Image (tube, grey):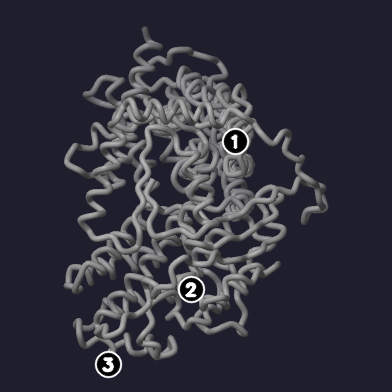
Amino acid sequence: MVVCGRPGPELAGAVRGVWGAVPVPRALVGLPPDVSGGEVVAALDGAVRVLGDERGQWEDARDMASGSSGDGAGEPPMAERGADRDGLKLDRLHVPLGPVLVDWPAGLVVETVLQGDVIQEAQVRALPAEVARGAFWEARPGERREETRRRTAAARLDSLGRLLGVAGWPAAAREARRLRDRLLAGAVDDGDRRRCVRFTRRVRRSWVLRWMLRGAGQIGPDAPRQLQGDALDRLHRWLDEIEAMVGVAEPGEVGERDGGSRVVREWGGREGSVGAFGGGRGSVGEVLALLPGLLVGAELAVARLIVAGLDPDLDRLPAGAEAGTRDG
Amino acid sequence: MAAGVMALGMAVLVWGAAAFDAALGGARGGRGVAGAPFREGARLVVQQRRRTDRADVLLTRAGVVVLPLAALLAAVVLPVGGAPVLDMGAGVVWFNAMEVCVWGALWLVGWGVNAVWPLVGGYRFLAQGMAYELPHMFVLITAGVGAGSLRFADVVAAQRGLWFVVWMPVAFVVYLVSAVAMAFWGPMGQPVGRDVCGGVPGELGGPDRLVFLAGRYALLVVAAAGAVPLFLGGAAGPVLPGWGWGLLKTVAVLAVLVVVRHRVPVVRMDRFVQFSWVVLIPLTLLQLLVVAMAVLP
């Protein structure tokens, strides 16, 4: 298990919980935010050594077995019951989504009440970030425009990797992540551009994906423009943006004469911001405020698609805004 | 003897499907995809079992073991390489009954481990069963009506002139959809979805997980093999011996099913149930009607 960054107290508790459930053989690697490439390699090599240490793994297994056998707190309370949408009395389960969940925005917690797999109540909160540093997807001071565009496309691909993962299309999710890494690694060449366009076309053409996203997470006209519509509209906006950012123009001159400039203007002309939805800092807060209303009444599968399709980047939440809980 | 050959053939096909899936999934590292299923198997054999709080171990293990057993028992009536291991008069019904055991298996595992994601996976498979089972049964009946018998050997014999796939194309396509659904594979993989952390087998580790995953591949193999006697003329074909044709046709169907996983996202059951009842069931009934009018005196 690899822990990236420095988790705050609550997140650290969740990380411990996950680690406790990882079966032996296992190794834990912590990578603080400021490690160098060499240190990452050394840490992973160390993990390989730990995994190969037969005696240490046996001891770990024995410790786990003796530690978890004590049931401790006695009988857990029985699930309470409540009326569901079909007028039946069903068990209510209190299930937190996050803060550690695969393909889920880091640090987001949705406390849900589930009946079957339908969300009856939802409370949304964001865990406070431990280190108040610039968010990864935030534009950096002195960054060239070409670089901003490249990183914007990478940010969208990063979000798409989660959305496609949740949508159960591992092949496309993997491709999104591969392209993201290529874009982050350095200047975009013609090959990257072709691969990006091929990828966006492939995602756009999938009728099953359209069928699954249409109508999910409908947001009305009062919200910021880039949030409006359903999950499918938002997916298409991401794809448009990726194409505009890498697809059409020469690197270095992108944006002045092509489709790219249209998109940038439409997205509020925030050349300096890279993250989710052109990342006006307020927009992450708005997404969090909208979420409970969107999630209540949704089935778990739809709820996951809604969250992944909005993909709030909590690193970019204004300081202090994470404390507020939002009920639904 | 025949049973041994059948089990061996299934094992080889399970390995082939898993290796092909790994290849499409971008398994790299120069060590080749042929060994990928073995490496994963070895990893799971030495892995610790996962324990959840207040799990019902008996129910969970029973569910895990039922998966490969159901696949094996469904396979004994299939005449893929000539004669089946067990030539049963109601073989088609037996085949279907063994598949339905999967419902119980998934629910037992999802319920037994006492954790929320597997439980949701179990719910999902029940909804999925509601969606695919009726069209699936109508499709099996269609092939049976076409042959005038529920014995697999008779179904194959009835295709001597013309394969059923040619004049029952709708039934064949729906069979493939339900085949994917009964193996909760690819687009029908919501019960084991990534969005619910692996769903039904999410809390299984070590050998439990290995048996579950192998059982799932075995189900996929059996579902693919079922298409051969039902729609593709069984072991019949020129030049090659019967078993060669049976194997070739099975591999072809299996390859299609594996490729589909990498091309199509997961289908949400709340949408698919509606599609199934409004579109698939009427279509299969129509197909059944056409076949019945052509065959019955």
Q: Position of residue A314 (x, y in %)?
A: 49, 70
Q: Is residue B96 left or right of residue B213?
A: right
- Secondary structure beneath disc 3? loop
The kind of residue tagged 1 is Gly
Which residue corresponds to the image point at 48% horizontal and 64% vertical from the top-left? A210
The C terminus of chain A lies in quadrant? bottom right
Which residue corresponds to the image point at 44% horizontal and 34% vertical from the top-left? A23
Contact? badges 2 and 1 (CB < 8 Å): no
Q: Which mark is residue A256?
A: 3
In three-dimensional space, the C-alpha distance between marks 3 and 2, rounded to whole angstroms, equals: 24 Å
Question: Of residues B180 and A169, which is closer to you in this image?
Answer: A169
Instruction: Tell me if I can see residue B196 in this picture.
Output: yes
Which residue corresponds to the image point at 46% horizontal and 32% vertical from the top-left? B205
Dot placed on the residue nearer the N-terminal end, 3 or 2 = 2
Q: Is residue A173 left or right of residue A9?
A: left
Query: What residue is disc 1 on?
Result: B110
Query: What residue is disc 2 on?
Result: A234
Q: Which mark is residue B284?
A: none
In three-dimensional space, the C-alpha distance between marks 3 and 1, rounded to whole angstroms, equals: 56 Å
- Secondary structure beneath disc 1? helix
The kind of residue tagged 3 is Glu
- Secondary structure beneath disc 2? helix
The kind of residue tagged 2 is Arg
Contact? badges 3 and 1 (CB < 8 Å): no
